[in-house]
Amino acid sequence: MRLYDCRKASERDAAISAAVSAVRAGDLVVLPTDTVYGLGADAFKSWSIEALLRTKNRGRDMAPPVLVGSRKALDGLTMSVPNNVKDLAAAFWPGPLTIVMHYSPTLQWDLGDTDGTVAVRMPLHPVALEVLTETGPMAVSSANKTGEPPAATAMEAKQQLGYSVSVYLEAGPSADTVPSTIVDCASSTVRVLRQGALSLDRIREVIPDALGPDDE
């Protein structure tokens, strides 16, 4: 287990390389995002997903979201990217928007009990994007034990998660701890499930008939 300081030019390249190697080996890593720090694992290694859920004290009913390093990565997650997903991704990615959509049944992954859907986001953070560009899609949840405060630094995450994580990437305190907005695009009706950093009005600038969490 090691903590790297990505703010130091002398450590950054080694930090990214160590995190990528750890993910490819099936280990857990902690990395910064544009919201809180995330606990990440290879989305296609079932044992890594099990380790992530176990580390957070979560069950399979709380499947982790998936982070991607580019909008093009959506093409590999579904048979056909719906137009509303394309429009939202074009407007708000990279950024604090999580999109729930159906994933391709041919994907060899097991994120938990998902009912065939996945929550996907492209974070606006250079360290996260560098890692994701090399690893491909990662399952990433907030870097904390369930019920404990989300970590705003890698050191805070280390205090909670300890040796269950192989590599911690420190990039300083999170600039914004407001969570991402979650939009469900898995049915014919687009609905905001959680209003976070992006308001319902912002979503409606792209999807005018999007419903809010309490709309019938």
Image (tube, rainbow, N blue to C red):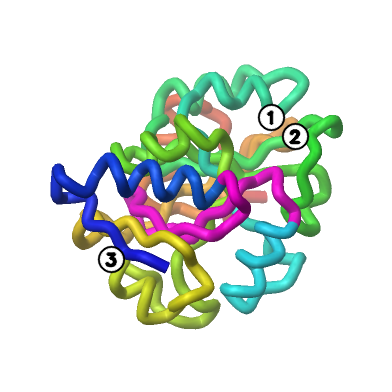
SS class, disc 3 = loop
Horizontal side of residue 66 vs 95, given as left or right: right
Label 2 SS? loop
Depicted 179 relative to depicted 159: above or below: above
Report if residue 114 is visible in the image: yes
Quote the CA–CA distance across marks 1 and 2: 5 Å
Residue at image location 35% in from the left, 43% down from the top: 16
User: Which residue is denoted by mark 1 in the rendering?
Assistant: 77
Q: Nearer the viewer, residue 191 or 45?
A: 45
Q: Quadrant of the N terminus?
A: bottom left
| Alpha carbons under labels 3 and 1: distance apart | 30 Å
2 vs 3, front mark: 3
Give coordinates of residue 38: x percent, y percent: 44, 58
Q: Mark 3 — residue?
A: 153
Q: Which residue is mark 2?
A: 103
| First along the sequence among labels 2 and 3 | 2
CB atoms of marks 2 and 3 within 8 Å: no
Q: Earlier in the sequence, mark 1 or mark 2?
A: 1
Which class describes the residues within 10 Å of circle 3: few (<14), some (14-19), or many (20+)? many
